[in-house]
Image (cartoon, rainbow, N blue to C red):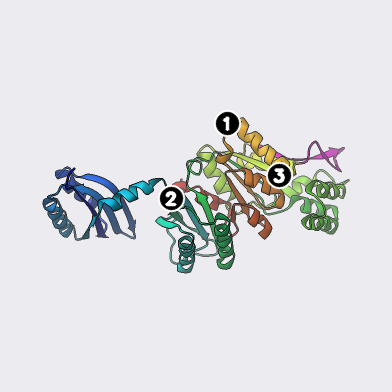
Amino acid sequence: MPNEQLILIHVTGQDRPGLTATLAEVLADFGVDILDIGQSVIHDFLTLGILVRLPADSKPVLKDMLFKAHELGVSMKLHPLEKEKYESWVGAANRPRHIVTLLARHITSAQVARVSTIMRDNGLNIDTIHRLSGRMPLDSDRSLSRACVEFTVRGTPRDMAALRAQLLDLSAALGVDIAFQEDNIFRRNRRLVAFDMDSTLIQAEVIDELAKEAGVGDKVAAITEEAMRGELDFSQSLTKRLALLEGLDESVLEKVYDRLPLTEGAERLIRVLKSVGYTVAILSGGFTYFGNRLKERLGLDYVYANQLEIVNGKLTGRAEGYIVDANKKAELLKHIADKEGISLQQCIAVGDGANDLPMLNLAGLGIAFHAKPKVKQGARQSISTLGLDSILYLIGVRDRETVH
């Protein structure tokens, strides 16, 4: 269209039902094309942007728009846009986009300022910011609350490893969690979540609880420390610890299960994911007895863990079959994904230990949950401030969508 004009119409003011419809009707009367549109409302205060293409004689439509804005009691500003700048904007449409998710018990200006600064310093531009968490009452208990803000950013980081290190350092300094993910089709279409069990799905290490019942708690803890120092691999460590449980009565298993606390947010997370068709699995270096009880309680689909050998009602101090170690967890994740016809990019894996890292890094979304610093550094994402249900924020779910 020769001599056409591009105008960005910027409207701000008190929101009311039908406001956008009324303004759009004015444009419709003149047959105006809308090239872009965006609107947000915070506490009943509206910000609306409409990028339009107008004929050379644009005065009638702009006059009517300004009159209607005055009638509605809102402010309207008109910004002419050069065609070259518009074409440049169109050409940038395929630039990579990422999602930055800020998680905390409550959001502060310092957190937003620091995250925004890191984005700027890494050559990224913030396109949108949305709150995913629910509205927070002024008198809410911050120790129990959860808050989340999601940033959509555009561009390619200058150094991805350096950016992730900066975000990890900032998370530690401010006591928050910050996830950085590519905004792609897989992020919006995860289908499988696999959990480690001990210290992830439950707030306990089962073998430690069994050791207490057997009166060998200190000895088992010492072997665990050897493994943490890298002096034993997981299979060696498990074999030595299990040997100390020889002769423990089978009835102790139920006694220990009855006192195992679920991790904050576990039931809510699984309920929501199951309601939208997720497959949920436990891949654990713990024991099948406890995994299967959780499967019944939470409605899980798969449990893979170590099978305690029991003879005449007593633990023999050995495991039956294969040991579920780090490599086995990754192998099992792939096995389940293949069986379900799901891409690994559609998988979420959650764990707290070094033996979880292979499966965390195999999954499209791997999350180190309340993990040691070395595990956080080895995983792409981590959560340390909130419960398991905060994983919903990392897949873009708003709190208001889970109330039913």
The magenta stretch spans residue 334? no
Q: Which residue is mark 3?
A: 284
Q: CA distance from mark 2 to mark 3?
A: 32 Å
Residue in view at x 66 percent, y 60 percent: 373
Return the residue nearer the eye: 20 or 111: 111
Determine which of the numbered discs, if any, sits on residue 341 in the image.
1
Q: Seen in the image, is 240 located left or right of residue 255? A: right
Amino acid at the residue labelled 2: Arg
Kindly tell me whether residue 202 is visible in this rendering.
Answer: yes
Residue 193 vs 367, above or below: the answer is above
Q: What crowding class fits label 3: few (fewer than 14 Cα within 10 Å), some (14-19), or many (20 or more)?
A: many
| Cα distance in 3D space between marks 1 and 2 | 30 Å
* Residue 314 covered by magenta stretch: yes
Residue 97 image position (x, y, % from top left): 45, 49
Asked which secondary structure carries label 3, the reply is: strand
Cα distance between the residues tagged 3 and 1:
22 Å
Mark 1 or mark 3, which is nearer the start of the sequence?
Answer: 3
Which span is picked out in magenta? 302-323
Query: The N terminus lies in which quarter of the figure?
Result: top left
Circle 2 SS class: helix
